[in-house]
Every structure is written in structure tokens, then in C-alpha cells.
Image (cartoon, rainbow, N blue to C red):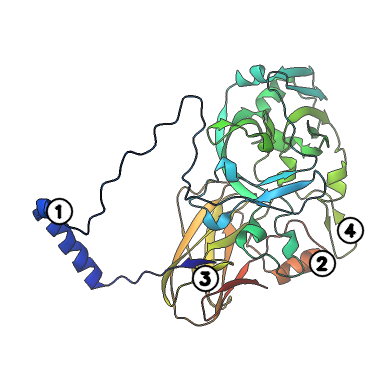
Amino acid sequence: MKKITQFKPNRRHFMQAGMATSAALLANSALAEDSVLIPSRGPGRLISETGTYGVRSQYAKEVRMKGSANGLVGGAFTPLQNSQGMVTPSGLHFEVHHSGVPDIDPSEHKLLIHGMVKDKKIFTMEDLLRFPSVSHFHFLECAGNGMGEWMAPRGKSVQQTHGLTSCSEWTGVPLKILLNELGVHGNAKWLLAEGDDGARLARSIPLWKAMDDAFLAYAQNGEFLRAEQGFPLRLIVPGFEGNMNIKWLRRLELSDKPWWTHHEVTEYADPRPDDKIRAFSFFMEARSVITSPSAGMKLNGPGFYEISGLAWSGAGTVKKVEVSTDGGAIWQDASLQAPVLPKCHTRFHMPWTWDGRETTIQSRTTDDTGYVQPSYEEMYKLQGPIGLMHNNAIQNWHIAQDGEITNVR
């Protein structure tokens, strides 16, 4: 279990720091012979050979956690408890697929755009790389992120409860550039995006979104997409549920109505208490979670700690994050770490002095549309007890007197 050590600054610490600095300036020669200094190290390893891919330090051990899988359907969870800033390293970005990860040669990959357009066309990757590109930071979140928490708290860490969200810089071609070039029929309202995986995963995308901020990404965090993230081409629809950001994109078809594909009428539909079902949720609503301290960690005694976490909203920009350290009785504003960008993870911080007593810590976010992250009680009223997808309820971390942190409702 990871321990979090508190820091207790006082006047003596600052006095000692100042005295040490003065001594270093006045007695370099004496210090060089002091036995307390760390001996000089020998030569380190040589620079990586040409053609190799850089690796991280052997002491950085955070990894993705595999989730439950049924055959080729499965995923892996991002270690949010170890995250720094807002960007997720490509190698730690969460992964979900429905028929395994295909091996696609980019020189042979093609994208067909057809249907209600004046000129249908097939684009190669070489063609797409010639178009003007954009780069944007956006989060992706699986609609099933936290689905295991719906009826009862189960996750032993924030990686298990919230690890199906990550944030990257994506680079590619705005979709509207291609659609405008081909000419869209006036009565077209929807677009079908289909992947080149074994499942031929396909989703209906409203045309207004395609003409707004959707784009065809071929790079992530400064390098070409990784295979599990859709290499060589994926659709990015900022703020929409992860399943709609089709990977290994091979076909776009325009129509005047949605396709009602398998995934949009089964797994990703939201039941309602009145026996109705919402087929299209689109946006991942505003959500936040404290990543440190969080479940699986242990506070190392009373004292000062920094509470830190992530907030995001698929409908806009995080406006405010509040933190409660007493189970929701009192809420205080946390500070937002720049940059604060639309449809992007935002890092928040709040200083806290733990008095050693049992308590529960929480966070909730408000976005620039005025939407406030709900509690589980509020979510139940909306979706009923059988709702699983799109769970953005407030997360509770319980801190025991011995400092151990667990997931509670």
C-alpha cells in the first residue's frame, strides 16, 4: 500500500536551509572532503542506439491494469493515482476494444467517404497527410467508466473506479475540410463511422458534430497513433463518449437518419425509470475525482497534505472544482492548474491539514454550462437502479484513523 508522507514546514526548517546555503558558498573546498557527501557515480549507460525507442526509468513502474475480458472484448485501465499534470502518456492511455487490435499497414489503409455527398472518394493515408492539420488536447472516456460502482463500491483504487479516461494531444485533419471538399447534400443529418477491426464497430454521429470540432487523428502526443489507439487513423469527436471515437477508421457514410447500430441500441443505451431508453447520450457529463490521496493509499499520520485530482466535461470547460474533507458538509474551492481547456482533463489542487480523525473526502465539478456533478442519489433518480453507463457521480474516499483509505458510498 502506498504511503503518503506529510510535510510540516516551520521556521526552523527555513533557518536550516538558509544556513546550509551559506555554508556551501563559503566552504566548497571543505565540503568536498566531507564524508557526508554522496560519492561520485561512475559513467552511466550510453545514449540509445540509433533506431531504438526510448524507455522510462526502471524505477517508474506504473502500468495499466487489465480489466475483465470476454474473448477479444476487453480493456486496460489508466493508473490515475500516479498521474501528473493533465496529459496521459500514450503507453498508459486506457484501452478498450471489441474484437482485438488489428495489425494495419498504413500504406494499404484507405478511408471511404460516400452516401449523401456530391462526390464520393477514397483517401489514402498519404492523401490525408497532405491536408492542413490541427492539434488539440482532449480527454477520452469510456461510457462504462465506473459502471462496476453503480450498485455498490467495488474498486480498490482510483485506477479501478475511474481508469477508463485519459487525456492526450491529438493531431489530424478537421473532418469538415473533407466533407466540404466532397459537398454534403442539404438534407444529410447523420454520419456513420465504421472501424476496420474484426467487429466492424460502427456508430452514428450527428452531422452538426462532424462539421463542428470532429477530426481524423493520425497522431497522439507527438507521434503516430499506437495500434491499440487506432493506428493509422481514428475519429476524434471531442467530449462524446469514447465508443463514438471510432478507431482504425475505414468508412464514413452520410445519411438523413441514424443507423441504429448494435452498440447504440444495446450496451451504450441508457435505461430510464419510466421504462424508456435513451439511445444517444453523446456527451460525457462533467465529472471529477480525487486521485491523491485515494483508495489503496495510506496517510502517514496527521499533518499537511495536498489533495489533488482531475476534472473534465464533455460539454465544455471545467469552471470550478469544490472539495469536501468532512463527507460533504462543507465544500471549499480548489485551485485549477493551467492550462484549463475545453473538453480536456483539468488538474486541481487544495491544501489540507488532516487532524487524524476518521473522515470522508470528495470532489465535485461545475462546467461552464452550469452543470454540477451529481451525487449517487441524484443519479439514481435519473437512471434508476439498473443504469450502468455514463456514471459521473461524486466519488467518496473514506480515511480511517490509521490513515488507510478505502472506496465507500
The numbered mark, 4 or 1, whose residue comes first in the sequence reads 1
Is mark 3 in CB contact (under 8 Å) with mark 2? no
Check disc 4 and report its element: helix, strand or loop.
Answer: loop
Q: Which residue is mark 4?
A: 276
The numbered mark, 3 or 2, whose residue comes first in the sequence reads 3
Q: Number of callouts in the render?
A: 4
Closest to the camera, between mark 2 and mark 4, is: 2
Q: CA distance from mark 1 to mark 2?
A: 71 Å
Of the pair 162 and 324, the residue shown nearer to us: 162
Closest to the camera, between mark 4 and mark 3, is: 3
Residue at the right extreme of this rendering: 275
Of the pair 248 and 385, the residue shown nearer to us: 248
Determine whether 375 is above or below 121 in the image.
below
Residue 167 appears in the picture as rendered: yes
Residue at position x 85%, y 33% from top?
A: 256
Amino acid identity at mark 4: Lys
Residue 33's tag is 1
- Classify residue 118 as left or right of residue 48: right
